[in-house]
């Protein structure tokens, strides 16, 4: 059974930092591209950051220079370090594991964690 469990969300003031984690089980973590998405109320889900099995990273323009994605294959965990947070970063953040066994379903998803940035 595949499980992705996010943690680390919360309420923070603008300019503050949070570190999100996503712990995966039931997949061969090291071969999956891991992605963080977010969805704010009334808005479409957007891709925030991704890291491939080889360690290549990509970021949305809106978070470049502020967010850092990393992975620990020994612990089957992906992190999203979020610095200089802005109120517009407020959203539910979800991780996604995309690998050879999940292409048809668009990857596996976690439940999400709420991030709220106050002004």
Image (tube, rainbow, N blue to C red):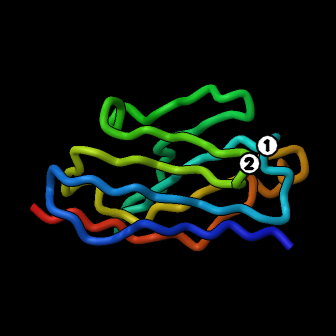
Residue 74 bears which disc, if any?
2
Residue 107 x, y percent position in the rendering: 75, 54
Query: In terms of image quadrants, where is residue 57?
Result: top right
Q: CA distance from mark 1 to mark 2?
A: 9 Å
All told, the count of numbered labels is 2
Residue at 35%, 69% (x, y): give it.
41
The image shows residue 13, relative to residue 84, as above or below, that is below
Give the side of residue 9 with respect to residue 30, left or right: left
The image shows residue 19, relative to residue 62, as above or below, that is below
Q: Earlier in the sequence, mark 1 or mark 2?
A: 1
Indicate which label's residue lies in the foreground, 1 or 2: 2
Residue wearing tag 1: 30
Give the secondary structure at mark 2.
Answer: loop
Give the secondary structure at mark 1.
Answer: helix
The quadrant the N terminus occupies is bottom right
Residue at 63%, 67% (x, y): give it.
110
The quadrant the C terminus occupies is bottom left
């Amino acid at each position: 059974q595949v499980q992705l469990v996010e943690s680390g969300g919360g309420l923070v003031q603008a300019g503050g930092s949070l570190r999100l984690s996503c712990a995966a089980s039931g997949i061969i973590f090291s071969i999956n591209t891991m992605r963080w998405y977010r969805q704010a109320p009334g808005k479409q889900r957007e891709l925030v950051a991704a890291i491939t099995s080889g360690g290549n990273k990509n970021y949305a323009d809106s978070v470049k220079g502020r967010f850092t994605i990393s992975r620990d294959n020994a612990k089957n965990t992906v992190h999203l370090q979020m610095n200089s947070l802005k109120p517009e970063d407020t959203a539910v953040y979800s991780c996604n594991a995309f690998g050879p066994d999940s292409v048809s379903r668009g990857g596996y998803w976690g439940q999400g964690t709420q991030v709220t940035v106050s002004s």
